[in-house]
């Protein structure tokens, strides 16, 4: 139940030539306080409820619990979420024995492209594709819960 991931800005659209899967994701927050975010997500035709704990000091690790729920339940829960919905297309890129998830944001976060890579340990090394730019792991302003209230276009 521990999520270990690193997050990067994306510097080019070269990942579009490498992706294996893509899905639209719409998500909202029932709670966006840093100590425990509660997220409702529709990914493709599936619904999910996710609870995340506060990140550790490095920003690399935090507790995460996720359960698939009926998409109709997810749609109903989205109606009672805090204001500010995240809308993005997620591309899954296989690269050097890892899956890199690239999120191309829409709506009020249009123009932001972030990549995340999940790791088995905080000190696991991995090869970076050329299109990965500055690392933003642990930078709260790139958390989806933050972006739901502080849109990228207003920065």
Image (cartoon, rainbow, N blue to C red):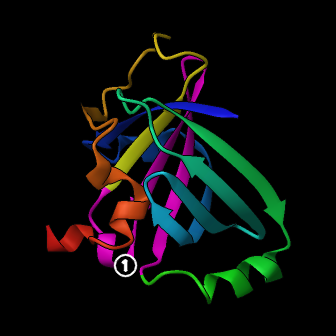
Where are the magenta residues, as a range?
A: 84-112
Does residue 79 show up magenta in the picture?
no
* Residue drawn 70% across the image and 34% down it: 1
Judge whether 110 appears above or below 101 on screen.
Answer: below
Q: Main secondary structure of the magenta part?
A: strand
* Residue drawn 48% across the image and 44% down it: 54
- Left or right of 110? Residue 74 is right
The quarter of the displayed image where residue 57 is located: top left
Does residue 96 show up magenta in the picture?
yes
- Left or right of 141? Residue 106 is right
Judge whether 152 appears above or below 92 on screen.
Answer: below
- Left or right of 37? Residue 64 is right
Name the spot of residue 5 as percent of width and height, x first.
49, 31
Name the spot of residue 146 as percent of width and height, x first.
35, 62
The residue lying toward the viewer, choosing from 30 and 24, is 30
Name the spot of residue 6 as percent of width and height, x first.
42, 31
* Residue drawn 73% across the image and 87% down it: 76
Q: Report the residue marked by disc 1.
A: 107
Residue closest to the far front: 35
The residue lying toward the viewer, choosing from 139 and 19, is 139
């Amino acid at each position: 139940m521990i999520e270990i991931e690193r997050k990067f800005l994306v510097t080019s659209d070269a990942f579009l030539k490498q992706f294996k899967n893509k899905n639209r994701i719409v998500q909202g927050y029932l709670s966006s306080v840093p100590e425990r975010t509660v997220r409702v997500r529709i990914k493709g035709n599936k619904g999910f409820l996710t609870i995340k704990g506060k990140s550790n000091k490095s920003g690399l690790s935090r507790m995460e619990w996720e359960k698939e729920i009926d998409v109709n339940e997810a749609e109903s829960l989205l109606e009672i979420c805090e204001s500010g919905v995240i809308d993005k297309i997620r591309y899954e890129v296989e690269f050097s024995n890892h899956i890199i998830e690239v999120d191309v944001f829409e709506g009020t976060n249009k123009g932001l492209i972030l990549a995340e890579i999940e790791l088995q340990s905080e000190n696991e090394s991995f090869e970076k594709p050329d299109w990965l730019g500055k690392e933003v792991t642990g930078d709260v302003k790139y958390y989806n819960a933050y972006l739901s209230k502080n849109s990228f276009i207003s920065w």
